Image: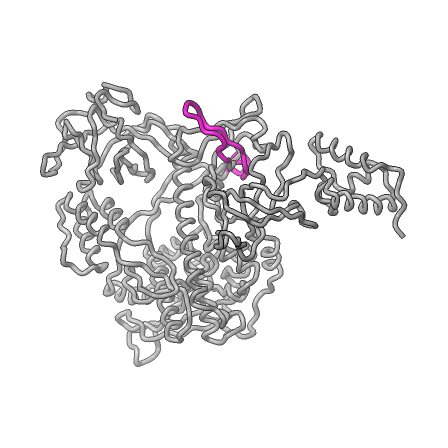
């Protein structure tokens, strides 16, 4: 029997909801019941009444615990903008024209998935929409979906929306704000955000905005679309890159639940290798340890001077199975992203830092490859095994190197002779084969930012590259090659790591750069890594060493993941696959699954129904994710260094011209490795044209020029930390160039010419 209705008009409920909303509160059903003193029967009546009001479209969201709001009627067909994806990957839209100050929070519209609609008149299916697109939607009310009241079927994509504009919100006293863009190209082009269009953003918030109105004489107007976090509270510059590149940084509840529920692996279906003293060697600050190594002389009399090297890799496939929430999220991420101040992991911490971290003295599941090397370093054979292991020690690269060099500490003294020296001996053998193979031997220092407790840069260092780094790297390469060979021999599908040879155009540019420093690139030489190694050997120890190493690196193609092999040019290998880090790379997880299926060692391998087309798509997605991660990491480093240098305006630095175009020069500073820009308009009282063949900017009247690779002395004029941009002024002399493009130092000091105008302003006589 239904509960009796209290003496309470429906309008009183609606009036209460509106009053609460005006006061900045969003009442739930319990709040309404408490406000009107309803007993148990009254609460049942209220639940039924709220459902009726929702059905009649007077209110939204009448579920337990969810806010109850007066319904904002939407038309059956509405123009919307796609704002984001939810945790399930579905697109979420909102009305294109919506003023939160007058209408409250904009309703969210779930874009219906499934096959695109077709029109009898137009015939072709509606194209798949994406974030930022403006779409015409056919709306349908949703029931029981917390936070989302509508779904929408795409009738037509009205136009590809402008890419999201990210920036830092700065509040103004009148309730409006301004946007400081994070994009280097948008430096100095701020936007105004009117009152009522701020989306509740607070000063210092990272926000996404939509530009609403352009102006020829003033800054454009914008509306805040989304608050993405506060740089003040999170003290994380990496937050900018995470959102600028759409890097997923929160795991869905389903994925987290799967990770927490995962049981520890047992010996069932595995070989017991817990007595083999495998050890991990990682950076000192590493939180996860997914690879372990061991080596010993080969006791086989048929292999004199040989070694047996074992590489064990955490068995992530036993916890992340195809088709699960964990698997979907790992594929979406593609890889972990490493910032100076944080890591955005591919897998939840329960998996990466616990169950699959090869901790010392704890049982862990792994896939291991046993490699038999001959005395000359060539591989005699290999075999893969699914094992249960127990790491004998956790060492840093520095610890291991010191012990090998005869300076063991307390942790390494006991294992130096029994574990570390056999590893060193096996590496010496493997290095012979590597040297004979002649992979590309670039020598580029990697800068590392040391941060303070508040997340700002303390200093920039170039860590020493130790022999132990090379030891682990070589053993990982051997394991990766063995994985590719095993799967290819078995006829299994897999994802290769491939690297194409340089293009003819890039080789032409390299030849021109080399010619500028007196080195001739042989035109008829075979395109092999050894060709580049000869060049690098010629300039070793010269002032051009670092510069030419960077130019050779730029000449190389981008490595990628593919389902069909074409080899790895840089490593000079015919077949190569990533096997050694499934914690942080999805490609490795696919290879692990393929190996498990090939060995028939479990039901968690690559599904037999997997097709080549599916792996092509996976390879394309994770290659794109890798490029996304690289760009985000690079931009974050640039922003942190710009913060670091912001209080050194006016200071002078030495550097080298690392790039140039019609707009000016890009200079890489010594020490920090920071990249700054010198606008062409600040070079002097001349018109500087860009000579692409000479890789130089050349003054038309004076012949004064600056060339790619030139050493320069510069002054820091401006730092834009949010954008990661530095503006520089040249202090050093240029060169003079003759008609045959021979370069020599200019005889006239630049300082005298620069006195004609202030830095950053157009000089007299400069052409526009």
**The residue positioned farthest toward the top in the image shown:** 756
| Viewer-side residue, 499 vs 402 | 499
Residue 301 figure quarter: bottom left
| As drawn, 337 above or below 718 | below
- Magenta span: 210-235
Residue 553 part of the magenta segment: no
At x 47%, y 37%, the residue is 166
Residue 693 figure quarter: top left
- State which quarter of the image contains the C terminus: top left
Residue 421 shows up from this direction: no
Q: Residue 295: image x %, image y %?
A: 38, 68
The image shows a total of numbered marks equal to 0
Residue 261 shows up from this direction: yes
The figure's colour scheme reads one colour
Residue 215 part of the magenta segment: yes
Q: Residue 297: image x %, image y %?
A: 34, 72
Q: Is residue 22 left or right of residue 599?
A: right
Q: Residue 391: image x %, image y %?
A: 48, 64
| As drawn, 592 above or below 351 | below
Q: Residue 125: image x %, image y %?
A: 50, 54
| Viewer-side residue, 242 vs 642 | 242
| As drawn, 419 above or below 22 | below
**The residue positioned farthest toward the bottom in the image shown:** 302
At x 73%, y 47%, the residue is 63
**The residue positioned farthest toward the front in the image shown:** 121
| As drawn, 392 above or below 252 | below
| Viewer-side residue, 692 vs 203 | 692
């Amino acid at each position: 029997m239904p509960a009796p209705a209290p003496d309470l008009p429906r309008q009183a409920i609606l009036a209460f909801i509106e009053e609460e909303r005006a006061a900045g509160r969003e009442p739930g059903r319990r709040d309404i019941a408490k406000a009107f003193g309803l007993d148990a029967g009254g609460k049942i009546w209220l639940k039924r009444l709220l459902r009726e009001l929702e059905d009649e479209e007077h209110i939204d969201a009448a579920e337990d615990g969810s806010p109850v709001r007066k319904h904002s009627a939407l038309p059956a067909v509405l123009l919307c903008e796609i704002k984001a994806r939810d945790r399930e990957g579905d697109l979420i839209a909102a009305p294109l024209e919506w003023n939160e100050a007058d209408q409250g929070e904009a309703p969210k519209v779930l874009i219906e998935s499934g096959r695109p609609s077709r029109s009898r008149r137009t015939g072709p299916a509606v194209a798949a929409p994406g974030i930022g697109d403006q779409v015409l939607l056919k709306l349908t009310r949703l029931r029981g979906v917390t936070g989302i009241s509508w779904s929408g079927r795409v009738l037509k994509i009205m136009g590809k929306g402008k890419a999201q504009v990210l920036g830092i919100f700065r509040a103004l006293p009148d309730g409006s704000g301004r946007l400081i863009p994070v994009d280097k190209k948008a430096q100095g082009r701020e936007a105004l955000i009117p009152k009522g269009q701020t989306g509740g953003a607070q000063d210092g918030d990272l926000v996404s905005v939509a530009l609403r109105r352009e102006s020829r004489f003033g800054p454009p107007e914008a509306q805040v679309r989304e608050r993405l976090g506060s740089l003040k509270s999170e003290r994380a510059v990496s937050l900018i890159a995470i959102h600028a590149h759409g890097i997923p940084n929160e795991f869905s509840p389903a994925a987290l639940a799967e990770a927490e529920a995962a049981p520890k692996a047992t010996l069932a279906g595995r070989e017991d290798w817990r007595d083999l003293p495998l050890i991990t060697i990682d950076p000192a600050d590493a939180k996860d340890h997914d690879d372990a190594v061991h080596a010993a002389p080969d006791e086989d009399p048929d292999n004199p001077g040989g070694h047996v090297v074992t590489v064990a890799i955490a068995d992530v496939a036993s916890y992340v199975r195809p088709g699960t929430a964990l698997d979907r999220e790992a594929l979406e991420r593609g890889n972990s992203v490493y910032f100076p101040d944080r890591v955005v992991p591919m897998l939840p911490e329960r998996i990466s830092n616990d169950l699959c971290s090869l901790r010392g003295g704890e049982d862990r599941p792994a896939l291991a490859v046993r490699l038999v090397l001959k005395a000359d370093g060539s591989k005699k054979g290999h075999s893969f095994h699914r094992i249960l292991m127990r790491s004998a020690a956790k060492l840093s690269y520095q610890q291991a190197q010191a012990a090998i060099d005869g300076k063991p500490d307390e942790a390494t003294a006991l294992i130096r002779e029994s574990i570390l020296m056999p590893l060193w001996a096996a590496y010496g053998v493997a290095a012979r084969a590597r040297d004979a193979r002649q992979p590309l031997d670039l020598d580029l220092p990697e800068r590392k930012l040391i941060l303070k407790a508040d997340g700002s840069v303390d200093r920039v260092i170039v860590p020493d590259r130790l022999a132990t780094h090379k030891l682990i790297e070589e053993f990982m390469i051997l394991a990766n090659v063995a994985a590719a060979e095993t799967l290819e021999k078995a006829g299994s599908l897999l994802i290769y790591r491939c690297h194409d040879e340089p293009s003819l155009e890039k080789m032409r540019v390299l030849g021109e750069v080399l010619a500028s420093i007196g080195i001739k690139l042989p035109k008829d030489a075979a395109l092999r890594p050894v060709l580049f190694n000869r060049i690098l050997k010629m300039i070793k120890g010269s002032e051009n060493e670092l510069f030419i190493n960077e130019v050779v690196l730029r000449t190389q193609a981008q490595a990628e993941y593919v389902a069909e092999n074409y080899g790895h040019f840089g490593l000079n290998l015919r077949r190569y696959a990533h096997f050694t880090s499934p914690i942080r790379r999805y490609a490795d997880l696919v290879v692990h699954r393929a190996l498990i299926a090939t060995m028939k060692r479990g039901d968690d391998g690559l599904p037999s129904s997997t097709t080549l087309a599916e792996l092509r798509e996976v390879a394309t997605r994770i290659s794109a994710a890798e490029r996304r991660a690289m760009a985000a990491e690079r931009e974050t480093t640039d922003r942190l260094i710009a913060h670091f240098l912001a209080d050194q305006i006016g200071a002078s630095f030495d550097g080298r011209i690392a790039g140039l175009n019609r707009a000016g020069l890009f200079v890489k500073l010594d020490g920090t490795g920071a990249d700054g820009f010198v606008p062409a308009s600040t070079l002097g009282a001349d018109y500087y044209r860009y000579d692409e063949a000479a890789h130089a900017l050349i003054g038309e009247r004076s012949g004064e020029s600056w060339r790619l690779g030139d050493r320069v002395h510069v002054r820091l004029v401006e730092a834009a930390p949010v954008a990661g941009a530095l503006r520089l002024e040249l202090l050093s002399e240029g060169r003079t160039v003759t008609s045959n493009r021979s370069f020599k130092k200019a005889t006239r000091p630049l300082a005298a010419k620069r006195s004609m105008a202030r830095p950053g302003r157009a000089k007299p006589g400069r052409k526009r």
